[in-house]
């Protein structure tokens, strides 16, 4: 599974960094997927982060 954040859409609410810290962290006022290949153990929280992002800035691909 791969994850990325669209920096044009992200509003920097930081929810994803709390929901799935193994994959997302803040870089200034935007989130980045610093672990784009999502570890097995973080798949569920990564999907939750994508669903909960208020502006749907997270792209998850199987
Ligand atoms: Fe940005 Fe959405 Fe995360 S707005 S900080 S990608 S929850």
Image (cartoon, helix red, strand yellow):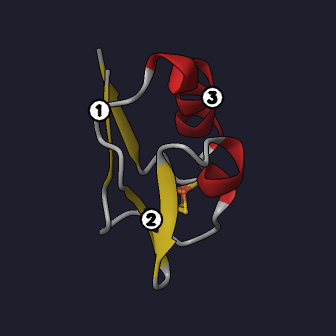
Q: Is residue 41 above or below residue 2?
A: above
Residue 13 percent location from the top left of the image: 64, 68
Q: Residue at x 55, y 26 (%)?
A: 42
Residue 6 percent location from the top left of the image: 30, 57
Residue ID for mark 2 = 10
- Residue 37 tag number: 1
Q: Nearer the viewer, residue 10 or 4?
A: 4
Q: Report the side of 56 relative to 13 (left or right).
A: left
Residue ID for mark 3 = 45
- Disc 1 crowd rating (10 Å Cα; few below 14, some 14-19, many 20+) is some
Mark 1 or 3: in front is 1
Q: Is residue 43 above or below residue 55?
A: above
Which of the four quarters of the rendered structure image does ligand 1 lie in?
bottom right
- Disc 3 crowd rating (10 Å Cα; few below 14, some 14-19, many 20+) is some
Q: Earlier in the sequence, mark 3 or mark 2?
A: 2
Residue 14 percent location from the top left of the image: 63, 64
Q: CA distance from mark 1 to mark 3?
A: 14 Å
Q: Residue at x 60, y 50 (%)?
A: 16
Q: Nearer the viewer, residue 11 or 19?
A: 19
Query: Is disc 2 placed on a helix, strand or loop?
Result: loop
Label 3 C-beta lies within 8 Å of the nearest ligand 1 atom: no
Q: Earlier in the sequence, mark 1 or mark 3?
A: 1
Query: Is disc 3 placed on a helix, strand or loop?
Result: helix
Q: Residue at x 32, y 67 (%)?
A: 7
- Residue 29 tag number: none
Q: CA distance from mark 3 to mark 2?
A: 18 Å
Q: Residue at x 42, y 51 (%)?
A: 57
């Amino acid at each position: 599974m791969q994850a990325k954040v669209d920096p044009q859409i992200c509003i920097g609410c930081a929810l994803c960094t709390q929901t799935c810290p193994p994959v997302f962290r803040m870089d200034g006022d935007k989130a980045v997927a610093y672990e784009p290949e999502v570890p097995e153990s973080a798949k569920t929280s990564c999907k939750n982060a994508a669903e909960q992002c208020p502006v749907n800035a997270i792209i998850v691909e199987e």
